[in-house]
Amino acid sequence: MGLLVESLGLKQFRNFREREVSFSPTTTILVGRNAVGKTNTVEALQMLTAGASFRHPTPSQLILADCERARIHARLAGDGRVVDVACDITPQRRQFSRNGKHCQAADMPSSLMSVLFCPDDLSLVKRGASFRRVELDGFGCQAAVGYSKLLAAYTRAIEQRNRLLKDERPDLSLLSAWDSSVAVGGATLLQARVRLFGRLREKILDVYGSIAGGEELTCTYESTVCDDPLALSREGLAERFLARLEEARSDDLRRQQTTVGPHRDDMVFAIDGRDARSFGSQGQQRSIVLALKMAEVLVSEDVTGSRPLLLLDDVMSELDETRRQSVIEFAQSGIQTVVTTTNLGYFSDELLGRSKVVEFGE
Ligand SMILES: Nc1ncnc2c1ncn2[C@@H]1O[C@H](COP(=O)(O)OP(=O)(O)OP(=O)(O)O)[C@@H](O)[C@H]1O
């Protein structure tokens, strides 16, 4: 079954001086008017599970105004185990720990992963490719061992190469050295990403079929390096990537940025053969995002053997009745879920009866 969140403690975190929240093993609904700290609570849960926040704050932004430090901690329990996870925040840094021992942010998901669904996600299909890459990489950092290190190393190498491309007269031998480093790191990252994408795709198609039966969804990873990154060995892919960087060199020098590589790839959805970005209705685009989020939950379970925590921040008001029902039914299939809302009217009496309701701002 895996670990569940039993309780959360917030000290001088965001708008909270001190707050404790305990959670149901099934559904917990955080209810309250605007700006009372519901999303802040979800953010703390995400930090203690995913090791990162979807808002990408600086440490100072996490600390209650006029205070010097903050602490968030959660007790996870299940399978006869108890794990205490925490994050101590100063204006300079975040220090994560598990059972009192320091650890890296990237280690947090190994206790419990989480999948967050918030209103911004609803436009994921039609937004720029970078948002879809961030989604895939954010999931990869939790679900695949070593993914966050690969991503960080590749991002650094691309930043260095781009910095060199911006020089007035770039040193070409240095550029070749960066090409090799980008190609080797990029090939490893690309294969990890495409492997993960393949696992997600299978589930996305299944789930989409159940939400929007009758429509045929296709989901493709579009690589700027080669058509099928998994058809080559890692070394073969690195060579291919190096050749692509050399082909693109004059263009890159002119544009002062690296134009090929996993940082320029995309995840493309099509319904009945037509690109969902431009042809999908808003409802279809939202169903794709729902299917993607549910797929992340299902793949997490396949990878870790236990279900992740599902965080639904303020999405109920954004979904129509059918899609709201799909999310609720999915969450009811044994997934610990935390939902925020300003209005309990979105939930049936039956669901309210089975859920724990926590009031904020009372
Ligand atoms: N570091 C901080 N110190 C003090 N207050 C903060 C800090 N960071 C955020 N806040 C406050 O937290 C509040 C926002 O909280 P949050 O985003 O959790 O709202 P919410 O309850 O989810 O509301 P909504 O329903 O509108 O989404 C704002 O009033 C904001 O000013």
Image (cartoon, helix red, strand yellow):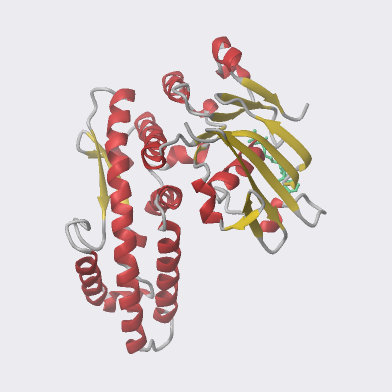
Left or right: 5 with respect to 227? right
Task: Please say if 263 is above or below 301.
Answer: below
Residue 74 x, y percent position in the rendering: 65, 41
Which quadrant would the C terminus be assigned to in this image? top right
Residue 337 x, y percent position in the rendering: 54, 29
Residue 298 x, y percent position in the rendering: 38, 34
**Farthest right residue in view:** 66
Residue 131 in sight from this viewpoint = yes
Q: Nearer the viewer, residue 185 or 66?
A: 185
Q: Nearer the viewer, residue 351 or 315?
A: 351
Q: Nearer the viewer, residue 236 or 15?
A: 236
Image quadrant where residue 256 sits: bottom left
Q: Nearer the viewer, residue 276 or 288?
A: 288
Image quadrant where residue 317 sits: top right
Left or right: 310 with respect to 284? right
Q: Residue at x 42, y 61 (%)?
A: 151
Total number of numbered discs in the rendering: 0
- Which image quarter has ligand 1? top right
Residue 58 in sight from this viewpoint = no
Task: Please say if 83 is above or below 92.
Answer: above
Left or right: 70 with respect to 111? right
**Farthest top residue in view:** 349
Left or right: 135 with respect to 75? left
Q: Residue at x 31, y 59 (%)?
A: 190
Residue 128 x, y percent position in the rendering: 39, 51
**Farthest front residue in view:** 80
Image quadrant where residue 38 sits: top right
